Each structure stands twice: as C-alpha cells, then as structure tokens.
Image (cartoon, coloured by chain):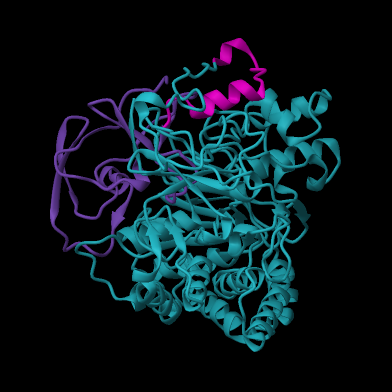
C-alpha cells in the first residue's frame, strides 16, 4: 500500500494527521509527501488525465506534487513539512 | 548608491556557500537567498531539524568530509551573512530580485549578484513515466538522505550519468533491494571513456567501487538499454526494457529511479539578461560565463551547476572564483596566487568532465522511439505527437512557438521536465539538431506563486527602473508598500484560462500563458489559499 518505505530515522516523534478522513501517523520532519506516501500510494489524480500521481523530482522543480487539504488549501508536498492535525486529501480530481 | 548594496548570492549549495565565505573574508556582508530550509544544496542537503540522527558518513558516504566542511563553512560565517532560507527568488529584473517568503513578496535591489542556482535531473519520457513509483534519480536520493525513505522495496535504476550508479549503491547500502541497473550507455562506449577518466583516479575508483559493490551483491547491470514502458495500473509493478540486442525483457519492481544526467536551472540568468550559448557537452543552452564566472551582464556572476554541469567539487571552486571576480570588479585586492590555483583546478575538472560525458552520453536516439501518444508534459498532458505535428506542419520551428501552440512548457513546471524532450522532438522532426530550435524564454514567476501573494511595487535603484512597463515606475524609498494602496503590478487575481482537450490545441498568446502561470498555483514554501 505505502509507496515510500522507511529504511532509517524511525525514532522521531509521531505526528498525527488525516488522509482522506482516515487517521494516520507520520514522523516529525516528514514532508507532506513522505507522510502521505508512507500511508498510501498516490498524492492526487492529475487534472488532464485520469491518472494517479505521486510526485517526481522531490526537489521543488517538477511541481507534480501539489496536494489539497480539506480546507481547500493547496500545498506543495515535497516542500512542506507535516504538522499535527493536518487534514490531507489524495482523492478526487482537480479541475483548477 | 549601488556600491552600498550588499552583494546577493542565490543558492546555498557548494557554489553559493564558498562564494559567501570569500566575500565575508573580504569584509562584505552578502545576502544569501535559498529555497531550502537548511544550507547545503541538493548534493549536501541536510536532514530537517528535529529527531534525525544518522551521521554524515551515513548520509554522504565518501563525500562526508566535503559535506561536513561545507556545512561548517556556512555555520562559521552565519552571523556575518544576511541568510534568507525558505525564500524563493521568483523574478530578476531591472536590478532587483523578487523574493517570496512566508507568503509575502519583497523586492531586493542588487548591484552585484552571484547566481548559484544548481541543477535537477534531465529526463526524457517513456510510457508509464508518470505512474506513482517512478521518480528521478535525484529525487530518489533526496528521499533517502532527507527523509530516511526508499522510493520502493525493489527499485530499478534507469538512465545514465554518475548518479545512476551512486544512488543504486546508496540504496543497496541502505538495505533496499536493487532490481537492476539499466544503463542507456553501450558497454563499449563506457570502456573507451575509462582511459580519459584516469585524469581523476579518485573519482574513477569510486565509480568502479560502486559497480563492483553492486555486482558483488548480485545486482544485474545492463548496458545499452532503452526503456519500453513502466507497467502498472495505479503504481509501478514492472519495468519493461529493450536490451542491447533488441530483446524486450521485463523486470518486476515497485519503483523506477530514472535520470539522464543533469539540467541547469538557468531561468534567473535569463531574466537577468544574460546572453546564452549552446553547449554541446550539456546539450543545452547555457548562460555565457568566462573562466572567472562573469556573465555577459556587468555585476552578474554565475557559479556551479546552474550555468553548466560540472559537479559539486567544481561548484565549490567556481563559487569562490566568482566571488573573487566580484571583488576584483569592486576594485578590492585579491590574492593572485589563489586565483591562479582555482583557475588551474577548474580547468582540470573541465577536462575530466569531457571524459565523464563520453562515459555517460546522452541517448540521442531515445526521442525517435517516443510514440506519438506518449505524454511528454506531466503538467498538462501534452503528447509527443502534438509537438511533432506543429513541427511537421511548419507551424513551429522553435521552442517558444511550439510552446504557444501545444502548451508544452507552459504548465506549472515551466518546461523544467519537458523542455529537453520538446527540443529533441522538434529538432529531430525538423532535422536541425537541438541547437537549431532555440530555447524556452524564462517567464516570471519562475515557480508558481500563491494567488494571495502581496506583490508590492518594488524599490528600484536610480536609473534602473526605466522601461519597466510591467512593474510601473521604480521607487527608491520605501522598502515595502502596504497591500491596501499597492495595486499589484501584475494581474495575480486573473482567472486561469481553462484548457480543455475537446477544444483542440490551444493557441494561447504569450499574454494568456503569463496569466495562466500565475493563476491558482501555490508557493514555493508550499502554501496556497485556493
């Protein structure tokens, strides 16, 4: 299920957030991308093709990792750190 | 007036840090602007604050000493630089940079600017390359170094360049199963190039060690490979590839780490007005720089991979060299012996780079094999066929026209991921060579801005703001104009034009693309109120 696999640095403090309404856990210092992809296998579906996406460059260049929060905020997942109580979405399509 | 401005360095990687160190040693207080939260750049990227415990030897391997030295160099001058982490430079125009930090934009006027903007992976598409589980080689390394994560349980490494073997080795060392190394370079080409690489025995030895280590652990290494497709419905479950003899083979894996060398981040140099030239070795248009790092624009200096790929060691030397050039141009004394030493070491690295390029050549035929229905643009789903069609029909003979007609290069990434492909497809359809189709013009903002960004009318140095129609007249007094009485210089709130496939190819003008690029995207710090 998880796309990213933790292989080190697992002694960090746990951070709780929700992914598509489901309560899940990440670790302090995780990016939103790491937090989502250690709990699932995509970040969003692409706007122009009904295909799942999970980021690509991880360094802020490709802009393929934008995700939405339940509040309607958009975050670039590779450049934003996870925070307690975030409510992130990987479902649904973007049309804007 | 301009001499009162502190020098500005963009980028806190190897080049930026060494430049800052040299300027501080001369008694200046440079501004160092960097997108990351911590200094080090990509190659020596530091883990986030809080709870990460791996030592530098685990993070950087053989390069731990260099990484540590660089990190310490910046720590040592930290109180003597105006360090701006988590800050995006989104424009460079009329003697000022536009910065975005914490959701607010600010103009930073400069008289002397060192651009050390670095590089990202160069990629070409193949069917399935947008599937979850396909990441760049650099990104796969970032996951491991910065997050302690592997991109999969069983990872295939595909492409060419030094990173291919380095990252495969690092994954193996981290306990991840490596499904194979799929090198696009024919074995004979690599063997021939080895002789030239003897110029730098240490680097050659490291490369051989990586290969030897991989082989000793049973990792298959294939040369002369071309990808057929990444397979999977919702995520990768196999890499299908063609071997050197033309046989199609399938390797089960749950991730593909992929890259074809590096691509310089040149947008700011372009916006600064630097003259570009086509570089055969990098197969890319690069801002011109002399041996010292001076660009064609007085006061603008270039250092590191952002103006030509030469690696981290060269970047450290070039950063210091550019700072010395800047000091010379300010009329400050510089140590001639140090200049000579740096020039000599840089020249040797350049010679070595030629051998490295021969060992990891760009697979020029790859583009011919891209099927017309393959998506080349991750942002907007543009296909290879669309680009070939505008070339064949004579509508586009260069990159910017092709962008206007197909939208390749017009999406959020502004061509970072697709421009190498578009150049190959256009030039091979037209028979011009990549030189012949020109380069994408950089457009501000160079990365998406939040729609709510407050963009004040910027202060501009005297005599530097003329003709700046987009921004309105420059002001030389207030540093920040409150949003209430500062109409945005540019229509940030203009709605994005929608692109619907059913409407056929969009023939968008430069103006609408401009608005589109601004509309509704997010900040580099990662946040946007939609």
Task: Look at 59% across and 65% down and name the residue there.
Answer: B304
Report the front residue among A63 and B527.
B527
Say whether residue B42 is visible. Answer: no
Magenta highlight range? B500-521
Residue extending furthest top?
Answer: B503
Q: How many marks?
A: 0
* Residue B507 colored in magenta in the image: yes
- Left or right of A94? Residue B471 is right
Q: Quadrant of the C terminus of chain B?
A: top left
Report the front residue among B314 and A65.
B314
**Chain B rendered in what hue?**
cyan
Residue extending furthest bottom?
Answer: B337
Q: Which chain is purple?
A: A
Q: Is residue B459 above or below residue B471?
A: below
Say whether residue B439 is visible. Answer: yes
- Left or right of B276? Residue B249 is left
Q: Is residue B374 above or below residue B244?
A: above
């Amino acid at each position: 299920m998880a796309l990213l696999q933790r292989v080190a640095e697992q002694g960090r403090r746990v951070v709780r957030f929700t992914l598509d309404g489901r309560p899940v856990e990440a670790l302090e210092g995780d990016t939103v991308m790491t937090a989502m992809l250690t709990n699932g296998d995509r970040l969003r579906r692409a706007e122009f093709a009904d295909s799942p996406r999970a980021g690509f460059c991880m360094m802020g260049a490709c802009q393929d990792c934008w995700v939405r929060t339940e509040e309607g905020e958009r975050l670039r997942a590779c450049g934003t750190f996870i925070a307690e109580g975030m409510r992130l979405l990987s479902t649904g399509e973007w049309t804007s | 007036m301009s001499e009162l401005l502190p020098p500005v360095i963009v980028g806190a990687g190897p080049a930026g840090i060494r430049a800052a160190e040299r300027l501080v040693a001369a008694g200046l207080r440079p501004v160092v602007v960097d997108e990351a939260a911590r200094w080090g750049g990509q190659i020596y990227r530091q883990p986030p604050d809080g709870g990460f415990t791996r030592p530098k030897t685990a993070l950087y391997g053989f390069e731990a000493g260099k990484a540590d030295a660089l990190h310490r160099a910046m720590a040592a001058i930290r109180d003597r630089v105006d360090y701006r982490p988590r800050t995006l430079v989104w424009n460079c125009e009329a003697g000022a940079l536009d910065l975005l930090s914490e959701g607010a934009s600010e103009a930073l006027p400069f008289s002397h600017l060192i651009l050390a903007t670095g590089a990202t992976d160069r990629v070409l598409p193949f069917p399935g390359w947008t599937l979850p589980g396909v990441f760049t080689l650099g990104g796969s390394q970032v996951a491991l170094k910065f997050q302690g994560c592997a991109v999969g349980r069983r990872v295939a490494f595909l492409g060419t360049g030094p990173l291919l073997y380095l990252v495969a080795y690092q994954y193996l060392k981290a306990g991840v199963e490596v499904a194979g190394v799929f090198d696009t370079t024919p074995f004979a080409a690599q063997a021939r190039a080895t002789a030239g690489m003897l110029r730098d025995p240490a680097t050659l030895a490291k490369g051989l060690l990586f290969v030897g280590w991989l082989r000793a652990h049973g990792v298959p290494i294939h040369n002369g490979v071309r990808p057929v497709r990444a397979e999977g419905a919702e995520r990768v479950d196999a890499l299908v590839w063609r071997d050197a003899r033309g046989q199609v083979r399938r390797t089960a894996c749950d991730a593909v780490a992929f890259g074809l060398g590096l691509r310089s981040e040149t947008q700011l140099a372009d916006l600064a007005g630097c003259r570009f030239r086509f570089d055969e070795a990098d197969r890319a248009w690069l801002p011109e720089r002399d041996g010292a790092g001076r660009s064609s624009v007085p006061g603008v200096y270039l250092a590191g991979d952002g103006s030509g790929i030469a690696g981290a060691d060269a970047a450290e030397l070039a950063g210091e060299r550019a700072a010395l050039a800047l000091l010379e141009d300010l009329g400050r004394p510089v140590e001639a012996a140090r200049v000579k030493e740096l020039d000599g070491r840089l020249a040797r690295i350049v010679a070595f780079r030629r051998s490295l390029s021969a060992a990891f050549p760009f697979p020029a035929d790859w583009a011919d094999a891209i099927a017309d229905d393959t998506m080349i643009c991750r942002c907007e789903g543009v296909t290879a066929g669309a680009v070939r069609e505008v070339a064949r029909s004579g509508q586009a003979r260069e990159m910017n026209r092709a962008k206007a007609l197909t939208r390749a290069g017009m999406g959020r990434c502004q061509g970072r991921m697709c421009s190498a492909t578009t150049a190959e497809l256009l030039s091979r359809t037209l028979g011009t060579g990549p030189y012949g189709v020109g380069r994408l013009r950089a457009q501000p903002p160079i990365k998406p801005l939040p729609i709510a960004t407050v963009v004040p009318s910027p202060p501009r140095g005297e005599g530097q703001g003329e003709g700046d129609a987009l921004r309105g007249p420059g002001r030389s007094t207030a540093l920040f104009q409150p949003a209430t009485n500062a109409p945005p210089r540019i229509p940030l709130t203009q709605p994005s034009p929608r692109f619907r496939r059913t409407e056929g190819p969009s023939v968008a003008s430069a103006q609408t693309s401009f608005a589109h690029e601004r509309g509704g995207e997010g900040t580099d710090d990662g946040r946007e109120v939609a």
